[in-house]
């Protein structure tokens, strides 16, 4: 790969995976340097990263190892790609608000290299409105994300919040530098997934069943194809409509993937896809989508779906996402 990768490690139990990530990236031919927060050093000694990377480890903004350069500026300029993995709620909040109070945040604000953020935290922390708001802010600022996976978390919960596996992150980095043409490069894709709630009064709201797996798969595939992806999940439908109108102005050429389940009550507002390249899943909308995917039950829980009379298997969300995006890209090319 022969690329310079700067790994920014913040403090969470997933730091142990970051050590393996340095090993995998190095084996793939990357030159890796590591910056750690003070909290990260509570979990893993910097020596582990030094041994794996064969480079000095940075953690003190004022510890200038080379008097000829300013360390955080030099690192910011050196990197071809910066990975923040694991990215805690704290480091995400700092970056979203332009706070630069340690080695990692000063470096991130100084770089012009692509920055990929791989969140890792408790499932409820990941779902907290403040964290979601910060992630949306970073997405709008052009940062890319490696979505956390679902599974057993160190805190004992089972849910979304596990740092993606080092092998998969390494594959994404290799793919990024492979030189292959990305059909969605330069495109923005907006994915709304999960279940959208509709308030019925000040104390009650209605929310349908959905797990968001199809939406997540479509978002992940769009990233693999080079798109800038914005994800909204399990939100208030009224808020989504407002956000969507703002995104229409900010990204007039965006693809809109409406993969969220909505209540079918009278009070359900209708989303407008006027002027957008949209894909819907049976929801009632204003305007005409590119594709409307139909299924017997909600797409997240269906074994197959119908696209223009053709039946597609949905039991494997990743394969379904690849198939659907191939249809979208082909339709765009015609």
Image (cartoon, grey):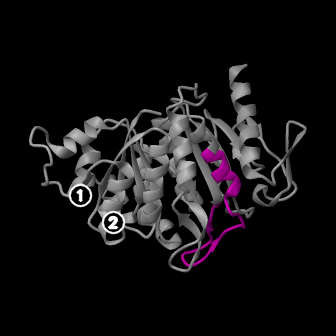
Visible in this render: residue 227?
no
Q: Residue at 46% x, 70% y: name it.
A: 125
Left or right: where 288 falls relative to 161: right
Q: Position of residue 130 (x, y in %)?
A: 41, 64
Residue under label 1? 59
Q: Residue at 37% x, 49% y: name it.
A: 53
Does the residue at mark 1 contact the one at mark 2 (Cβ under 8 Å)?
yes
Name the residue at the left extreme.
67
Q: Earlier in the sequence, mark 1 or mark 2?
A: 2
Identify which residue, 310 or 111, lies in the foreground: 111
Q: Position of residue 192 (x, y in %)?
A: 61, 51
| Span shown in magenta | 195-220
Label 1: few (<14), some or many (≥20) within 10 Å? many
Q: Residue at 57% x, 78% y: name it.
A: 157
How far apart in space, not on screen, are marks 1 and 2 (Cα)? 10 Å
Numbered circle sitting on residue 40: 2
Identify which residue, 70 or 124, lies in the foreground: 70
Left or right: where 224 falls relative to 251: right
Left or right: where 101 falls relative to 247: left
Q: Quadrant of the C terminus?
A: top right
Helix or strand or loop: what does disc 1 sit on? Answer: loop
Identify which residue, 9 or 313, lies in the foreground: 9
Q: Say if 86 sits above or below 285 in the image.
A: below
Residue 95 located within the stretch drawn in magenta: no
């Amino acid at each position: 790969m022969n690329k310079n990768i700067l790994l920014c490690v913040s403090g969470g139990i997933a730091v142990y995976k970051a050590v393996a990530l340095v090993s995998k990236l190095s084996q793939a031919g990357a030159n890796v340097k590591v910056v750690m927060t003070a909290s990260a050093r509570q979990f893993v000694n910097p020596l582990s990263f030094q041994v794996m990377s064969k480079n000095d480890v940075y953690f003190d903004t004022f510890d200038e190892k080379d008097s000829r350069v300013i360390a955080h500026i030099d690192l910011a300029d050196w990197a071809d790609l910066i990975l923040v993995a694991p990215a805690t709620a704290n480091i995400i909040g700092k970056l979203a608000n332009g706070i630069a109070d340690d080695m990692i945040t000063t470096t991130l604000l100084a770089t012009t290299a692509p920055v990929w953020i791989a969140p890792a935290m408790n499932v409820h922390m990941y779902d907290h409105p403040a964290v979601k708001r910060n992630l949306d802010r970073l997405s709008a600022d052009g940062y890319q994300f490696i979505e956390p996976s679902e599974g057993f978390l160190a805190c004992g919960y089972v849910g979304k919040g596990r740092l993606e596996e080092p092998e998969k992150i390494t594959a994404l980095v290799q793919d990024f530098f492979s030189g292959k043409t990305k059909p969605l490069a330069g495109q923005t894709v907006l994915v709304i997934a999960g279940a959208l709630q509709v308030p019925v009064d000040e104390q009650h709201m209605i929310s349908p069943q959905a797990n968001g797996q199809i939406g997540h798969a479509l978002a992940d595939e769009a990233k693999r194809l080079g798109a800038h992806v914005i994800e909204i999940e399990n939100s208030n439908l009224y808020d989504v409509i407002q956000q969507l109108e703002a995104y229409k102005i900010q990204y007039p050429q965006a693809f809109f993937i409406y993969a969220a389940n909505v209540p079918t009550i009278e009070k359900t507002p209708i989303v407008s896809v006027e002027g957008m390249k949209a894909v819907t899943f049976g929801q009632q909308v204003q305007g005409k989508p590119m594709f409307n995917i139909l299924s017997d039950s909600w797409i997240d829980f269906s074994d197959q779906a119908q696209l223009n009379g053709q039946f597609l298997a949905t039991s494997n969300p990743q394969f379904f996402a690849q198939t659907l995006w191939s249809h979208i890209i082909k339709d765009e090319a015609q």
